[in-house]
Amino acid sequence: MEDPKREIPAQSRSWYRLDTSAKIYPALESPENTNVFRFSMTLREDVDEALLLEAMNAVRPRFPYFHVHLRTGFFWHYLERNDNPLLLWPETPYPCERLYPVYNNGFLYRVRVYRRRIAVEFSHILTDGSGGMEFLKTLTAQYLMMKGELSAFPDGIINPADTADPREYEDAFMRVLEIEKDRINKIPRQRTLFQPDPVFKMRGKLLPLGAFRIVTGTASVEDLKKIAKKFGLTITELLAALYTEALLHIQFRQQRNPRKYRPVGMEIPVNMRSLYPLPAMGNFSLFVVPRFEPRMITEFSDIGEILKNYMKQHICKEHLLSMSIDNCALGENPFIRHTPVFIKDMVIRYLSQTQGHAQFSGTISNLGAVQLPPEMEAHVEDMAFMLGPPTQTLTSCAVLGYKGEIRINFGRVAKDTPVERHMFRRLVELGAAVRLTSN
Amino acid sequence: MAYCVHCGVKLADYHERCPLCNTLVLDPAARSSFQQEQEPDYPLYRQHLKNPEINPIRKLLTGIILTSVFSMYIIILILVNFIVNRELSWSLVPVASLVYLWFALALHFFRVRTSFFRIYTFNSFATAAYLLVLNFIISGDLHWAKFASSGIVFVWIIMNGIFISERGKKWIPMILYYIVASLLFTALFAFLLTNSEVIMRMVLPIYLSTLFYILVSYFIIKSLVFDIFNFLAIVLSAAALSAVSVELTLTRYLYGSFSLSWSLIVISALLPLSLTAFMLRNIRKLRSFFVKKLHR
């Protein structure tokens, strides 16, 4: 009997449970809300498609937990092994399109190739940013190996010759609770999933369904560090603060009545792997949502001050642990566990529409500086990270650093670009040289 | 590299307008030379999949849709006939035609890989069977269809020989094959032309039913991964079923009515054995299936 709680080698497993944070995504997936994010690497030469497909097949046994179907059980969705052939997709004008498993031989991720660029688009059901990045690193390294650019498989990235570690596909949040067994009782519970008052939502004319516009700004780390230092912030905080400032300005413009001003909430994902160094390849991140009351803010440094204090208080083991305890308790609740999956899906959809989306006005996800092994870095010129179409907030921001440069990637489903315009103009104003590309 | 005069940002060369404020930025004189050097970061149009791998799910979906359409028509026809006439009369002809169409059109979508020869084989046998059924429904015997059907099968046997010789390039087995096939066919035509009751009512049904069970179990065993328990389960149940059909045919011929006696003993011995073998093989899979579907 295959009980997922027992450790079975990944290659012989036929199915996996969804991890704690992935459980909501099958319910939330829709044509508007694709829940897809994307990484890409630009190489020095044009990509050989046949070779890339071979590389994909070569790394496939190392990541059995990514090569799965999404199936529906009676109480939960689950992932089942998928033995279909892999597909290599050409690039599209609009990245992060919805993943229709029927057209993708059932897989929940896809690889796209365009000239010199290899891109992987992952559904959030499978993994979060860090897991996707690890996969892309291995795939690219394997491709470069097969092409003869690398003599040996570089250290520091997952080697396809190894076998998968069972800790990679276990529920990492459960593991954290096991590690922190002694502290759990001392930590105060949050017990509030949602804040009662809704936040400001940007309004704007939408692009047609399926269209997704990208604006990528590239600036050097040195410039941004200098600016951040001026305000006493980190780079993530600086960018989040600028984003907040843009949203506040838009609110002042869109809402004439000051009594109707609403707070601005920024969703900032936190990678739990930095606090608990587990080799988890599933979803292992939480997010914090700092709120900014427009009446309390007179200038940019106020935003920075609020954000700095908030991050100091909330990005710590105690707070994140209490969040994960609450999340896991929800999944372990006997009443919820024994409710049929279609009822759970309906409730999740309802709560997400009414409560969840009212919690934040924008998303900024910083993956940090990505380090590649030096022998591989010579072949990889550029890297990018983008979040899927943000239907509710209209824009979202994904940040990634590589080779001393930071790529600030804005995706939008609205026609106009007020946030991007404000943000990049402010960055230029503050002394950063910004280079733009777009689709 | 151009700068936007409003935003102060540097723009990639392929941009004619600033993506932030839509201001025209490119020097029109320099445009042609830039565009040749620069490639845009994203294509302008969607492209099609470059390696058209067979997508089993899409094929399966087509098969399922066709099957459901055909079965819907069949059900409607039978219902209408039954409600209007209180018997199954005229609907049998269109139903048989629809079943034939399903064999000819929809069945191939359920296979991941089909070849021309496989489609041809299925369609020839489906046509032969359809003609027989049609003749039987219309006039209650097989006076013309038996010749037409055996003609189709004869053509298939010749084509089969050609296809196999194309692949195998082994000539002696090929010649043997043709000799056996033509002998069998001569025998068949001799039988079709003479009207012997024993052959028609006893030998042929027993022969055909046994052949049917052997073929069905052979294909089931071949389609599954070989396993001794599965093998036993299939062979034992096929043996039990063929015993039943043998006895039914015999009693029909000898006494003019269907009755079962010794085959019941055979069934009671073989079916439990077959079921046990089946459970022994599949209980793990069954249990795994339930664990998977009902995990909390």
Image: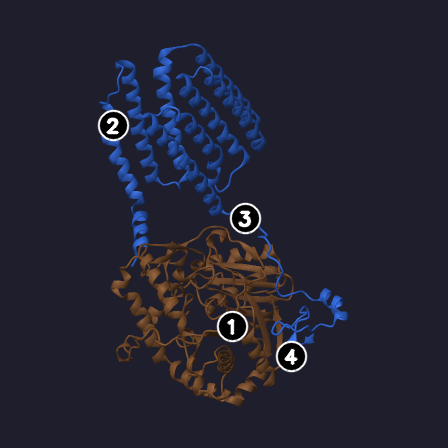
Q: Percent position (x, y) of residue B229?
A: 32, 40
Q: Residue B53: which numbered mark, if any? A: 3
Residue A288: give its label: none
User: Label 2 belongs to which residue?
Assistant: B266
- Give the residue pinned by disc 1: A398
Colour of chain B in the rendered structure image: blue
Which chain hosts label 3?
A: B
Cα–Cα gap, marks 2 and 1: 72 Å
Residue A399 x/y as whole percent: 52, 74
Chain (brown): A
Name which residue type carries label 3: Glu
Viewer-proximal residue, B129 or B112? B129
- Image quarter of residue A230: bottom right
Residue B277 sits above or below residue A22 on the image:
above
Q: Is mark 2 on a helix, strand or loop?
A: helix
Tell me if mark 1 has few (under 14), some (14-19) or many (20+) residues whose alpha carbon lies within 10 angstroms of its own: many
Chain letter behind tag 1? A
Near-viewer residue (A276 or B77): B77
Q: Is residue A1 visible?
A: no
Residue drawn at 51 percent across, 72 percent down: A398
**In which chain is the residue bearing label 2?**
B
Q: What element carries label 4?
A: loop
Type of residue at label 4? His
In the image, A191 versus A30, the foreground residue is A30
Q: Distance between the residues labelled 3 and 1?
A: 33 Å
Q: Do the residues labelled 3 and 1 touch (CB within 8 Å)?
A: no
What amino acid type is highlighted by mark number 2?
Answer: Val
Give the residue at mark 4: B6
